[in-house]
Structures are given as structure tokens and as C-alpha cells.
Amino acid sequence: PTGTTPAMAAMEVDAEAGTLQLYQRDVNCLSDDDRTTRRRALTRLAASVSTLASDEAAGMQTLAALWEQSLRAPLLKLLADPVEKNRELALALTAAVLEALPQPVIRASLAHVAPAAAARLSSSAAAEPTEELRLELLRLLGTLARRAGTPLSVYLPEIAAALRAGFADPFPDAKKAACSLCVQLSDVLAEHIEPHCAMLARALLPALAHQHSRVRTAAVEALVALLLREPSALAELGPQLALLATDRASSVREQAVGSVARLLAEMPHREANTARLLPHLLCALSDEVESIRSLAHTSLARLGGSTDVAAQRVQPLAALAPDLMAAADAATFDGAPPEAADARGEEAARVAAAAAAAA
């Protein structure tokens, strides 16, 4: 007869238990009082995990059993180890395990991993003090989103708090990572993130005005991802979007123009927001960079053909004054000469006024 007999099954269980025992000493050392002992155990376990992960059959099965039965709890505890090097090694090992584990095992571990990582990114006393490790924690949450998918939505309140802390992080790379994670979550958890969108969009304000252009660009992308799920924050953030559409950095302006075009094409109830968004595209028609002018022209043509934006009447200029004034004022945001700032602001208002008169 074929198949596994009870005796064979018992032998397999004993063999797996024996294999796991090979790693138990190192797992036990993770809880040792001596910092060096913990560090050495982390280093040895990292090598063991690498070896197990390379074996897609027996090795993966052993890794899953090791993680669930003995490694997970002490390893996650070391994310808050008092020694920075040990926290770094523990975080790297956790990331390596989550990359290797089968999806069902990862989903079964969300209740342990997601809150532990999010807590280290909060604004509480438990927050990670080292900026590079905060960056890696944000990337770890990104790995969870990619590998676990929809079940991660249960932990969105904790993750949203971590995102808000990431947007306000003094480390620029952490800000960018938080923005990337926000975009990822808006895609992976599109049906669940809406209740958090308005609060997250408001928390983005410091990043939208950051001194680094790459941070501002990442923040624009995150803002658009949120507005596509919940457009209610647009009225509050419209002036800031106007600033970005006339940003001192051409890369930011180009991102903003492309984002406005995407919002006009895809935002829910976009007709109600056309008058607030359309002036930003119109202002870009007179941008000093040819590629941005071309993007604005192309976007307007595409919108006119696909969504009948051209047939929608633009509100009188007075109703758009706050956004247009912000766009004009933004010309001085980059320290440009006053005469250049005036010219850019006047041209932006002139284009919008002409469009309004023609409507």
C-alpha cells in the first residue's frame, strides 16, 4: 500500500523536532542578559535562516516551524533591545524571514509582527531612536503589505499612526519611505484605507513643504493616492497643491501637474473639484520648462476627449482666488527675483482668467 503510515508520520515529526533542536540553543540565547551573547545568536540565526530559505522544500518547512514554534516571540522582542546593533540585526533577520515564509504563515503572524513594528514607529516612548532603523521598520511594513495583502487591514489604525509619525520624521529618507508605504497601502488596501485618508492627507502637510524636492515629490504622490480614495481633503489642501504646481524645483512641478491630471481623470466626484484643480493645469501651460508645458497640453487634450472637462464650465475667477493667489505667491517661495516672481504669478492668473472668460 502507498501513502504515509502512522509510524512514518511519527518518524517525520521526530525528525523535524530534531532539526529544530539544532537551532534551539541560538534561540534561547536571544533572551540572554549578555548583549554580546544576543548579538552572536542573531548572527548565527541569520546564517541559518539564509540556508533554510535556499531550500524551497524541506528548508522552508523547517523555517516555518522554527518561526512559529520558537523564534518569533524572542526575535520580535529584540526590536526594542537596548543595544542598537542588536536591534539592527533583529530587524534584518525579521525582514529576511518574512521575505522567505509562505504567505499563510505570514498572515498567521500579522497579529504579532504588525503591532510590534508599528509601535517602534509611533510617537510614544517606545519609538525607535535611530533614524536608519526607523527607515527599515517602514520598509518592513511595506514587506508585510506586499506579502500579506488584505488581512493587514485589521491593523490599519496602528499602521496609520506609524505613517503619521513617518511623515513628520526628521529623517528625509524616512519621510520618503512613509510616502511610498502610503501609496502601497492605498493600492493594496484600497477598500479599507478610506476612513484614514483625510487624517493622513492632513499629516502630509509638513512633507509637502519640505526643503528637499525629492521629499515633496514623494509627498505629492502619496497625497494623490489618498485623494483618489477620499477626495474630501482637497478643499483643505488645495492651496498647498497650488504651491507645488509652481514649486521652485521643476521635478516637483512636473509631478504636481501629472498628479492634477490624474485627479481630474480618476478622482471620485471629480466634477465637483474640476474648478479647483483645472487652474493648476492651465498655469502649467506657461511654465518655463518645455516638458511641463507639453505635459499640461497633453493632459488637457486627453481630459477634454475622455472626461469632457472642456465642456464643464470653469467657476468665475473670484471663486478660485485662494488657489490662484497661492499659485502666484509660490513664485516667491523659491527665492526667485521679485520681477520674475511677479511675471510668473501674473501669467498664471492671466491664463486662468482667459479660460474663465471663455467658458
Image (spheres, rainbow, N blue to C red):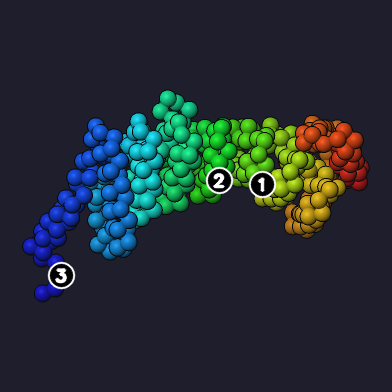
Residue 100 position by quadrant:
bottom left
The answer to whether residue 158 is seen in the rendering is: no
What x and y, as percent, mark residue 145? 45, 48
The answer to whether residue 222 is seen in the rendering is: yes
Work out whether mark 1 precedes mark 2 in sequence or the reverse, and give the earlier one: 2
Query: At 36% across and 43% down in the image, what residue appears?
Result: 89
Secondary structure under badge 1?
Answer: loop
Q: Residues within 10 Å of mark 3 (few under 14, many from 20)?
A: few
Q: Nearer the viewer, residue 303 or 10?
A: 10
Specify the label residue 3 is tagged with.
Answer: 3
Q: Which residue is mark 2?
A: 180
Closer to the camera: disc 1 or disc 2? 2
Gap between marks 3 and 2 measured at Cα:
49 Å
Query: At 63% across and 32% down in the image, what residue appears?
Result: 206
What x and y, as percent, mark residue 353? 89, 40
Specify the label residue 194 is tagged with.
Answer: none
Work out whether mark 3 precedes mark 1 in sequence or the reverse, and give the earlier one: 3
Closer to the camera: disc 3 or disc 2? 2
Given the image, on which type of amino acid does mark 1 rest?
A: Met
Given the image, on which type of amino acid does mark 3 rest?
A: Gly
What x and y, as percent, mark residue 45? 28, 49
Is mark 3 in CB contact (under 8 Å) with mark 2?
Answer: no
Specify the label residue 267 is tagged with.
Answer: 1
Gap between marks 3 and 1 measured at Cα:
57 Å
Gap between marks 1 and 2 measured at Cα:
20 Å
Q: Nearer the viewer, residue 54 or 294?
A: 54
Closer to the camera: disc 3 or disc 1? 3
